[in-house]
Image: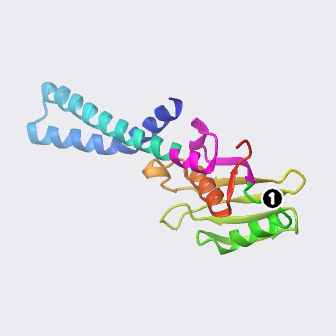
Amino acid sequence: MKLLLACWRAAVAVQSPLMAVQLLAGLVDDGFTWANLGQEAASAVLVWGTVSLVWAALVWWWLRRRSRTAGLTFSAAVLDDRQRHLLRPADVSDGWPERMRERLNSAERAFLIAEKGRQEEVRFRWRAGRSASSAHGSLAFDQATGTVLVDLRADEGHLGVAGLRRGTAFVAVCQVAGELGLTGAGG
C-alpha cells in the first residue's frame, strides 16, 4: 500500500502541470468567475486524480511483476534512487564469477564496463529504458557464499518507470538479474 501511495504521489507530481493547463483552459473558455473557478478546479482534481491513480496502479502492478520475476523484495524502497540487492547465480559451479562477467560483457544494455581487480567487482552502466539515460553501479562477487551484490544508482534526469521520474535503479536491477541469471538471495 505504501508503494501504491508513493507511485500516486509521483504520478500527481508529474501530471500537476497538465491539471493546471486544463484548469486555465476551462477558465479561458468559460470566463473567470468564482463559480467557474470552483467548478473547473473540482473537475480538474477529479479527472486528474483518477487518471493519476490508475496510472499509479499500473506502475505498481508492473513493478510487482518485475520484482517477482527477479525474486526481489517488493516494498516502497523500489522507488529509491539507489538499489542494493544480494543475489544468487542460478549456477554456482566452478567459474561462476567469470560467467557473470561474460554475460555482462555480452549484454546489449550494458556499457562502459570496467573491472576492479580480478575477484573484487565490476563497474558498469546499464541502459534501463529506451532513452540514452542509464543507471550506474557495480557487481561485487563473494565466492565463499556464492552471492553477487548488485549496487545501482539512477542517473539524474531519467524519466524512470512510466514517466514517474523514479524507479529506474530498481528496473535496472531486475534487468541485470534477468540477463545474468540471478535471483534474490532468499529464494
Q: Is residue 165 visible?
A: yes
Determine the residue located farthest toward the right in the rendered image. 144
Please name the residue shown 52% across and 56% down the image.
157
Q: Is residue 66 magenta?
A: yes
* Depth check, front residue: 130 or 107: 107
Residue type marked 1: Val
The colour style of the image is rainbow
Q: Is residue 154 visible?
A: no
**Looking at the figure, which quarter contains the C terminus?**
top right
Question: Which of the 4 image quadrants contains residue 175?
Answer: bottom right
Please name the residue shown 55% across and 60% down the image.
128
In this picture, residue 119 sits left or right of residue 132: right
- Percent position of residue 78, x then y: 59, 42
Q: Is residue 83 magenta?
A: yes
Q: Is residue 181 above or below residue 24?
A: below
Please name the residue shown 13% across and 29% down the image.
36
- Percent position of residue 80, x then y: 60, 43
In this picture, residue 65 sits left or right of residue 58: right
- Percent position of residue 54, x then y: 35, 39
- Percent position of residue 176, x then y: 64, 59
Question: Which of the 4 image quadrants contains residue 18?
Answer: top left
Question: Which of the 4 image quadrants contains residue 172?
Answer: bottom right
Determine the residue located farthest toward the left in the rendered image. 30
In this picture, residue 61 sits left or right of residue 94: left
Query: Which residue is labeled 1 in the image?
Result: 92
* Depth check, front residue: 104 or 112: 104
Determine the residue located farthest toward the bottom in the rendered image. 106
Question: Magenta part of the protein: which range?
Answer: 65-88
In this picture, residue 142 sits left or right of residue 70: right
Where disc 1 sits, the SS reads: loop
